[in-house]
Amino acid sequence: MSGTFEETKEILVPPGMLSFRELQTFKPEEREQYIRSVILDSLKNTKRGVTISELSKATHYNRITVARHLEHLVSVREAYRRQRNGITVFFKNGRLLNESDKLEIQIGDKIYSYYKLDNDEGSFIYIQEKTETPMRNQTTQGGIMIDIRDFHDFMKGLTQFGVAAGADQGGKP
């Protein structure tokens, strides 16, 4: 999703967003990807964060649908949540400061995307594992964020583990 955004009750949603009824004509996988992209774009363009209720109202998607997609986005580290006065608020996870702060490599059928992100919590190295769908879209399978201050120790530990596991010999101990 890209383009101009309109404000709906302080939540920025993509203009021309399809209704849930229109989405019923999509294949289930396409519908899930569309809804997830709308939610992610709404998070990206609403800097103060959003609650499930606010996002449900702005998008006209069912609360359960919104909650499920937000939980998925948190699980693959594309979003994060914070408690504010007993209310859960969701945010898009970080922002690239420079275009050079990203790298993408393909190994077999997996695509690994590396990003340097900054958010309210600090600076992080964000690694995503992606696959390509039959429609030639990329789907995030998972992700990990490492505080940039801990990255050297993380890599040292990962290298030690990889050597012990035989990764330096093509997986053969």
Image (cartoon, rainbow, N blue to C red):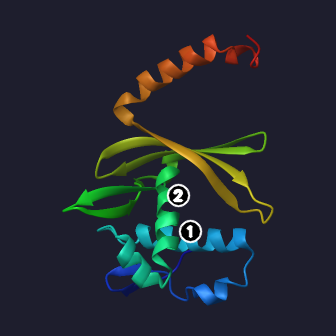
| Mark 2 vs mark 1, CA separation in Å | 9 Å
> Which residue is found at the position 71% from the left and 62% from the top?
137
* Residue 57 locus on image (x, y percent): 40, 83
Q: Check the picture and name the quadrant holding the C terminus.
A: top right
Q: Residue furthest right?
A: 134
What's the residue type where badge 1 is placed? Arg
* Residue 89 locus on image (x, y percent): 32, 64
> Which residue is found at the position 29% from the left and 47% from the top?
121
> As drawn, is 125 to the left or to the right of 47?
right
What's the residue type where badge 2 is placed? His
| Rendered position, 70 above or below 126 | below
Which of pointers 2 and 1 lies earlier in the amino acid sequence?
1
Q: Residue furthest left?
A: 85
* Residue 106 locus on image (x, y percent): 72, 42
Residue 139 placement: quadrant: bottom right
**Residue at disc 2, secondary structure:** helix
| Rendered position, 7 above or below 110 | below
> As drawn, is 21 to the left or to the right of 143?
right
Mark seen at residue 36: 1
> Which residue is found at the position 65% from the left and 83% from the top?
23
> As drawn, is 146 to the left or to the right of 143?
left
Q: Is residue 138 visible?
A: yes
> Which residue is found at the position 77% from the left and 62% from the top?
136
Q: Check the picture and name the quadrant holding the N terminus.
A: bottom right
* Residue 118 locus on image (x, y percent): 36, 49
**Residue at disc 1, secondary structure:** helix
Say if mark 2 contacts mark 1, CB within 8 Å: yes
Q: Which residue is mark 2?
A: 72
Q: Is residue 5 visible?
A: no
Residue 96 or residue 126, whichever sits in front: 126
Mark seen at residue 102: none
